[in-house]
Amino acid sequence: MRGRQGGGVRGRQGERGRGRPTPPPAPGPEGAVTVVRPEDDAYPVALRTLSEPPPLLYVRGTLRPEDAVAVAVVGARRATPYGLHIAEQLGRDLARHGVTVVSGLARGIDGAAHRGALAAGGRTLAVLGCGPDRAYPPEHARLLAQVVAAGAVLSEYPPGTPPLRHHFPLRNRLISGLSLGVVVVEGREDSGALITAECALAQGREVLAVPGSIFAPTSALPLRLLHEGATPVRHVEDVLDALRLPRRAASPAAPQPVALDGPEALLYGHLALEPQHIDVLARRCALPVATVGASLTVLELRGLVRALPGQRYVRVP
């Protein structure tokens, strides 16, 4: 689902001048924050195409030309293990294909997407609703430092600006504006990710969504977007194809699939990307819990299964 450029989130969210940044004092001795203006070479080309591009960006880290090939991965702060797994996997796989991963450094889906990109040695950009010197949430201070080292943290707001509520809808238009497309992994009907998707449509970007259970509240927004025409995402190839991005050839040294037999083969056939409790797996396989536990250990050692808290397990894509 792709929109046509027109309109802007500022007009829908409040007064045009609200939250507009003012030039800060000179950067501190460490020179960590760079002020980037639209006339500067470092200013992202994608943002220049917006109807209301930010007049100033406060940046920590380095913006590079290759960041023009970027995809946003967004969603719920209170994400499920399923959503966190998908977001991290998408972040990792996009980075492996040379795509910069954009998100908002929030709890849940955002953090998982950043971590996935970092784990693959790729680039990631975090757009904040506060000053670029502030970690929000505070527990993401280490993640913020990692993003600065492997990409960039950027904001419309000068150093020292607190994370005020009205900043975040405006922030979301930059997340979509920096990206060729926005993938919504999870979110309730009223999730902030809806604003990001609406901004993407207004900016002419592609909107994609990850299918989830019709019974899960956090799948309400992706299912709504899919009903309205968003591109479904099952794996990274769906994203690359929708955005007409090239695929990188797999490494010839990549491990080959492991042949399974016996209880492991039966159990693996019942595993899915959605977490399942060991007791549920035992019932579905008609096997003793002890046998299922031993087989899960074998599959986990082979890298085919991931254990989650509460004796729940998911298949590794």
Image (cartoon, rainbow, N blue to C red):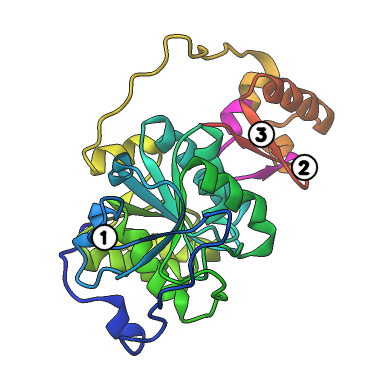
Q: Is residue 246 above or below residue 74?
A: above
Q: Position of residue 77 (x, y in %)?
A: 57, 63
State the residue at coordinates (23%, 53%): 45
Q: Residues within 10 Å of mark 2 (few under 14, many from 20)?
A: few
- Dividing the picture into quadrants, the one containing residue 275 is top right
Q: Left or right of 92: which side holds 298?
A: right
State the residue at coordinates (32%, 55%): 178
Q: Left or right of 308: which side holds 134?
A: left
Residue 196 visible here: no
Answer yes or no: do the residues labelled 2 and 3 have beta carbons within 8 Å? no
Q: Amino acid at mark 1?
A: Leu
Q: Amino acid at mark 2?
A: Gln
Of marks 3 and 1, the one in the foreground: 1
Residue at numbered disc 3: 306
Q: Is residue 6 above or below residue 178?
A: below
Q: Which residues are magenta?
A: 268-278
Q: Residues within 10 Å of mark 1 (few under 14, many from 20)?
A: many
Q: Earlier in the sequence, mark 2 or mark 3?
A: 3
Q: Earlier in the sequence, mark 3 or mark 1?
A: 1
Residue 77 visible here: yes
Residue at numbered disc 1: 47
Q: Amino acid at mark 3?
A: Arg
Q: Secondary structure at mark 1?
A: helix
